[in-house]
Amino acid sequence: MKRISYTILGFAALLLVASTAFATPWANSVVLKTRIFNDCPGSVLIPTNTYPALVEFDEDGLDCFGFANLHNWTLSQDGVNPHWYGNGDAFTLRATLVISGNDVNGSEAGLRVGPWWSPNVDGRFNVRVPDGEIAAFGGVLPFYSFSDPGGFNLHYTKGNPISLEIQYDPRSNTVGDEGRVQYEVVYLGNTYTSPWLTFGNCTLGEEWHGCYGIMDNARLGGFAQHRLTNGDPSAHAVSSFFDIFFLNTAPTAVKASTWGTIKAIYR
């Protein structure tokens, strides 16, 4: 019998859309990039990648004149190539960080939302020692400091675990409905959360990368920037990322189907 209930057809159409409406997590691995800054090329670096359990940069011999060595990890779908994320991709990225070692000049490490023009360096949710500052800045990320004396006045002490989380909600990425981000810190048993902060970026001539959000072709991950201590051959820094979690909740594109195509499935 070819006659079919339009109620059933409508339900089938909804199922077809629902089955493709939301993306599964878009990462199953990370790729490491070392010595992005390489002011101490003679240091001994031991990288570890057992994602999602642990990503670590253990670096010894930071006895050089200069600024720092910078390394990073980036979410990937194949374990070889960094994955690019779009302006409309909603996500949560979280990891537990421990900074350790005896480098007098300290280190900076944290999560990263690298914009298309500086995917390996900028867009940081940053933890810094020895002063303990915790702040988000750079790239297109809205600035927020957890160390502001007028706010949480929170400071990190080397050797302690600190959980960092970035939640990105693109909304419609338009004026009045800008993308927004929220930062969260869990430290010494306490949770600290920023307000939702909106993106204000929309550069003339670069609109095709996307406005009011992370912009297309962003990279997500973490970084470790180990500063140098000239004259101290024992200078040693370790940045360890545990329990890395990523969830992409952005809707996927739905293939257009005509009503006739849907009906034909049931003939």
Image (cartoon, rainbow, N blue to C red):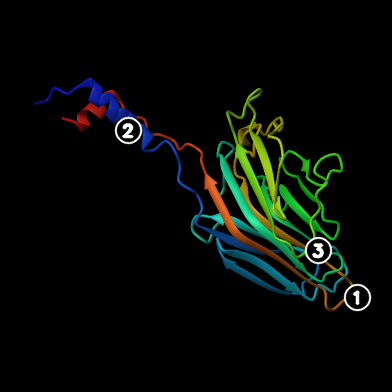
Q: Is residue 92 above or below residue 55?
A: above
Which residue is identified by label 2? 15
Measure the C-alpha gap from mark 1 to mark 2: 66 Å
Measured as percent of width and height from the top left, residue 7 is found at 25, 22
State how many labels appear. 3
- Mark 1 — residue? 231
- SS for callout 2: helix
Q: Quadrant of the C terminus?
A: top left
Relative to the observer, which residue lies in front, 238 or 63?
A: 238
The answer to which quarter of the image holds residue 60 is bottom right
Instruction: Look at 55% across and 39% down and name the residue there.
Output: 89
| Secondary structure category for the residue under label 1 | loop
Residue pictured at 59% horizontal, 34% vertical: 170
The amino acid type found where label 2 is placed reads: Leu
Please state if 231 lies on the left or on the right of 80 as rendered. right
Determine the residue located farthest toward the front in the rendered image. 189
Task: Decide: is 36 above or below 93.
Answer: below
Which residue type carries mark 1? Gly
Res. 205 image quadrant = top right
> In the rendered structure, are the residues bearing label 1 and label 3 in contact, judged by CB atoms less than 8 Å apart?
no
